[in-house]
Image (cartoon, rainbow, N blue to C red):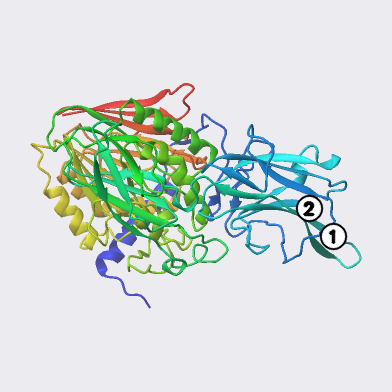
């Protein structure tokens, strides 16, 4: 039997009593109507976006659930050679396909079939990467009956394909049910031409940047299918004069590095390729550079970045922030808005947890990295870990599992246990915890990033680091102090499990945040937006009197929450709307917070407030 200290038992009792008081004597509460149509997410199994991004007739995403998805059966079968069915892949506007169709990463293709005079309701087309995959190892499928012309024996659908460093093909299957024997026979009627990708194994993809703790440095990382030739970055002060070259290192992870299903199952694991990392040094702070990354075999196009403001630099800057993204349709709008902000001059992006929502489905990492690359390769992309990156049922291989008796810490990463995130995002922390907790300075602001998915309780390794980091901040040089983590400390949502976790966060950390004068804390996890007053111990304070403004911002793309909320005296704005945060550090005494709609058609500011010193 597990033994808990008297201190832990007392905290559990206090939290439970507080929760009972909320339930028995709640504040007035109301149901809020979100600005945009949404749908409920009431299952512990996360929604997983399909590769083809199928949509139901009512315009909601046909996402599948990890443990309840209904997939077509696909026993090993041989091709019916005289079926008469034709299946081909073309690029829209490019022309008729040959034996191989060459597409860019993320490029759109059209899949067409003909010669099926009597398609059954169970006929389907599967995507296979590589082409020698077994029949049951398809990445996704498309039901033939969804094409209006299927009754006429032909049809077409379009989708985007992603370079997973292997070729791909489509296969047409017919599922024939036999009434008398109650069995189903699978027939393979056609195989498409092969899809190849531009650049093949040598194509540099998924480029993204990261700050270090030194404004004269910039970290560049990308993916390809080859370890050699050595990865390199060419850069300079003009796009036509990339006269400096720096070489880097390459790494990868294997199926056995992942700690459980779904991630370590052969059906869902796909080789991530080689993750290349190059550290650029001896740069000038606050300076624009042009660069390209790759190897002697293949380089990216030329892009640019701007190095960080040095600590204490009084110049104004802005950054954007959001959490809980994934690859859903709304996430694509957030990505478009983020690119717009970066092109306007946003210094970096801060994403506190729930990044790709791959939850063990490796192909989603490929999609999400492609989604953010247009702006993550122009401005640093700084991340924190969320429950869907890190949390597992058992301790992960690095020994960082966190399962307090009061917490809703389950199997949310579906076996990833932080490995893909750790390998893909080289944040400026210590070698063991470089993504989990770290800090950096930018101009007049100190940023502290910590993990709600690791032990944060008083006396833990992370708490000691957090206390030391916040205590070391030179407020003369960096008067603003911003903290980010994933699970929120304060929330008005009627979500009992998260209320308990939030109260433990408050009991363990609020005193430290208040004593060290933290100005703003940014959270994700709950799929809604909320801003508090400067608050301490559930009570609003005047600015600069010990209270901290809390922002919950899990609104980047995952389906929104739609539940009852309590009317809390410390809540200043709540809404279930997709959007992102924009923070402008104006000077030593003024900071502007804005919550902006991710719909670029209006780009409306939905909430804003000034923090003043």
Residue 319's x, y, as percent? 29, 33
Front residue of this view, candidates 147 and 550: 147
Q: In this view, which residue lies farthest toward the bottom?
A: 1
Q: Is residue 527 left or right of residue 170?
A: left
Q: Is residue 396 visible?
A: yes
Q: Position of residue 162 (x, y in %)?
A: 53, 47
The crowding category of the residue bearing disc 1, from other C-alpha atoms within 10 Å (few below 14, some 14 to 19, many at least 20), is some
Q: Are marks 2 and 1 in contact (CB under 8 Å)?
A: yes
Tell me where residue 490 appears, x and y as whole percent: 34, 44
Task: Give the mark nearer the N terminus: 2 vs 1.
Answer: 2
Percent from the top left, x then y, of residue 49?
A: 56, 47
Q: Considering depth in this image, is 425 or 197 the residue closer to the camera?
A: 197
Q: Which residue is mark 1?
A: 177
Q: Is residue 339 left or right of residue 360?
A: left
Of the 4 image quadrants, the one containing the N terminus is bottom left
Q: Nearer the viewer, residue 564 or 367?
A: 367
* Residue 35, placed above or below residue 185: above
Q: Residue furthest left?
A: 476
> How many labels sit on residues?
2
Residue carrying label 2: 122
What is the secondary structure assignment of the residue under circle 1?
Answer: strand
- Mark 2–mark 1 distance (CA, rounded to whole Å): 9 Å
Q: Measuring 39% from the left and 37% from the top, which residue is drawn there?
A: 301
Quadrant where the C terminus sits is: top left
Mark on residue 528?
A: none
**Residue 186 occupies which quadrant of the picture?**
bottom right
Residue plotted at (78% across, 53% down): 122
Q: Nearer the viewer, residue 24 or 546?
A: 546
Q: On screen, 8 above or below 335?
A: below
Mark 2, other Cα within 10 Å: few <14 / some 14–19 / many ≥20: some
Residue drawn at (40%, 32%), measured in percent from left and top? 339
- Dot 2 falls on a residue whose secondary structure is loop
């Amino acid at each position: 039997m597990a033994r808990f200290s008297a201190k832990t038992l007392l905290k559990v009792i206090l939290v439970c009593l507080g929760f009972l008081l909320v339930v028995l004597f709640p504040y007035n509460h109301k149901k809020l109507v979100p600005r945009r149509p949404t749908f409920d997410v009431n299952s512990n199994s996360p929604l997983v976006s399909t590769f083809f991004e199928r949509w139901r007739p009512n315009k909601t995403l046909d996402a599948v659930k990890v443990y309840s998805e209904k997939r077509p059966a696909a026993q090993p079968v041989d091709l019916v050679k005289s079926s008469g069915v034709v299946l081909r892949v073309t690029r829209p506007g490019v022309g008729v396909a040959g034996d191989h169709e060459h597409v860019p990463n993320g490029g759109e293709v059209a899949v067409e079939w003909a010669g099926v005079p009597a398609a059954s309701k169970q006929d389907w087309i599967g995507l296979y990467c590589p082409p020698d995959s077994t029949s049951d190892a398809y990445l996704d499928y498309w039901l033939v009956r969804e094409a209006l012309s299927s009754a006429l024996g032909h049809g077409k659908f379009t989708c985007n394909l992603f370079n997973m460093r292997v070729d791909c093909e489509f296969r047409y299957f017919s599922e024939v049910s036999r009434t008398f024997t109650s069995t189903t026979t699978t027939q393979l009627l056609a195989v498409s031409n092969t899809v190849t990708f531009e650049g093949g194994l040598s194509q540099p993809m998924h480029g993204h940047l990261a700050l270090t703790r030194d404004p004269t440095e910039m970290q560049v990382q990308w993916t390809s299918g080859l370890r050699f030739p050595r990865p390199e970055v060419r850069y300079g002060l003009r796009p036509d004069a990339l006269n400096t070259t720096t070489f880097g290192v390459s790494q990868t992870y294997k199926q056995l590095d992942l700690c459980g299903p779904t991630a370590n199952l052969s059906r869902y694991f796909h080789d991530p390729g080689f993750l290349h990392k190059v550290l650029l040094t001896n740069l000038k702070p606050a300076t624009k550079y042009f660069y390209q990354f790759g190897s002697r075999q293949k380089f990216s196009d030329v892009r640019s970045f701007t190095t960080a403001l040095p600590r204490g630099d009084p110049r104004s800057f802005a950054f954007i922030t959001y959490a809980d993204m994934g690859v859903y349709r709304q996430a694509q709008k957030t990505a478009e808005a983020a690119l717009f902000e970066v092109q306007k001059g946003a210094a970096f992006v801060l994403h506190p947890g729930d990044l790709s929502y791959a939850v063990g489905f490796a192909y989603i990492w490929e999609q999400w990295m492609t989604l953010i690359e247009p702006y993550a390769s122009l401005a640093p992309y700084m991340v924190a870990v969320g429950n869907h990156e890190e949390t597992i049922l058992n301790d992960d291989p690095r020994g960082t599992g966190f399962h307090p008796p009061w917490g809703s810490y389950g199997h949310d990463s579906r076996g990833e246990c932080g490995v893909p995130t750790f390998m893909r995002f080289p944040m400026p922390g210590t070698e063991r915890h470089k993504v989990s907790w770290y800090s950096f300075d930018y101009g007049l602001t100190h940023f502290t990033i910590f993990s709600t998915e690791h032990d944060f309780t008083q006396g833990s390794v992370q708490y000691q680091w957090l206390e030391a980091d916040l205590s070391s901040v030179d407020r003369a040089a960096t008067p603003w102090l911003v903290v980010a983590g994933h699970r929120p400390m304060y929330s008005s949502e009627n979500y009992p499990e998260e209320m308990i976790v939030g109260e433990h966060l408050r009991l363990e950390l609020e005193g430290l945040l208040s004593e060290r004068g933290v100005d703003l804390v940014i959270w994700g996890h709950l799929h809604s937006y909320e801003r508090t007053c400067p608050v301490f111990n559930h009570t609003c304070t005047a600015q600069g009197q010990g209270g901290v403004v809390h922002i919950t911002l899990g609104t980047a793309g995952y389906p929104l929450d739609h539940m009852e909320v309590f009317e809390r005296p410390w809540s200043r704005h709540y809404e279930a709307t997709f959007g992102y945060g924009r923070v402008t550090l104006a000077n030593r005494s003024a900071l502007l917070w804005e919550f902006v709609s991710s719909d670029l058609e209006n780009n409306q500011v939905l909430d804003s407030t000034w923090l003043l010193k």
